[in-house]
Amino acid sequence: MTAKNKNYGFQTTLSSKDYFENLKNDFEIEKIYFSIKEEVFTVGYDNKAKEERAKELAEFLIKEWEFKNDKKIDYDFDECNKWEYHDGNTSVYPSTLKLKVNISEPRTIIKKNLGMTYKIDSHDFDIDGNKIMVIINNESLKKIFSIYENEVLSSDNQKKAYYGIYKILEELKCSTGDFDELSRITGISKTKLENIQQSAQPQRHARTLASEIISVQESKKIIRKLIDKYLSYLQEKSIKQNERNN
């Protein structure tokens, strides 16, 4: 059963239509159904109590997509179509989710698995939900992805981007315990992490002790790699925990 056939849900339009011409994603997370076909984004569920969880999942599906593609999706939670079925009839009224997109030129990721090579459109959403579940159940990752979206991604303000990078490093440091552990987990040297953080100090009106000043562009590349590796580490940890529980 698809998202639009569920008893409750919301639907909005992504723009521009031309960009989403070939995009088609249908998937389910926690009995909440998502459908992205052409420019139409639909979320459906049978239990009305899942509405807030559906919105939260939709939000972090977007944030993860933004991070993966390094592209900005403009959205807010204040206008879209929401439905409820009552005795075979549908009530439709404005809800609390609006998504707007202005992106160009999809990239193609080449993956190899079991000796086979296949292409995946990198503009697909996280249809298996593995990353989303790790993100949404980890408060530090939720903060990190929100900071990346709001302060680092596509920021024309160097000071704001640097400050966002600094805050992400602080959050990761706090989450793992220290830079030594973060370096061990991600394979990125402690010195590099410290230099990135110290490079941001002048933008925070603080004195820098960096042995090497790393540009905001290079810092962003490294911070993306850092987040990706930390997320992969938590995914592997979650898989092992589930295997032990089963």
Image: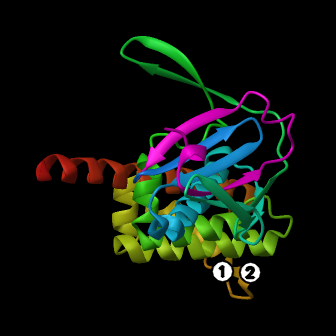
| Residue 179 occupies quadrant | bottom left
Q: What stretch is highlighted in magenta?
A: 1-29
Do we see residue 171 in this rendering? yes
The residue drawn where x is 65% and y is 51% is 221
Residue 125: x and y, percent? 59, 42
Above or below — where is 36 with respect to 153? above
Above or below — where is 238 with respect to 167? above
The residue drawn where x is 65% and y is 32% is 24
- First in sequence: mark 2 or mark 1? 2
Contact check, label 2 and label 1, Cβ < 8 Å: yes
The residue drawn where x is 13% and y is 53% is 245
Q: Which amino acid does label 2 sit on?
A: Pro
Colour pattern: rainbow
Depth check: give the residue in front, 8 or 237: 8
Q: Mark 2 points at which residue?
A: 202
Residue 8: x and y, percent? 56, 58
Relative side of 42 to 161, left or right = left
Above or below — where is 151 with respect to 7? below
Depth check: give the residue in front, 97 or 20: 97
Q: Name the residue under label 1.
A: 208
Residue 135: x and y, percent? 46, 60
Q: Is disc 2 placed on a helix, strand or loop? A: helix
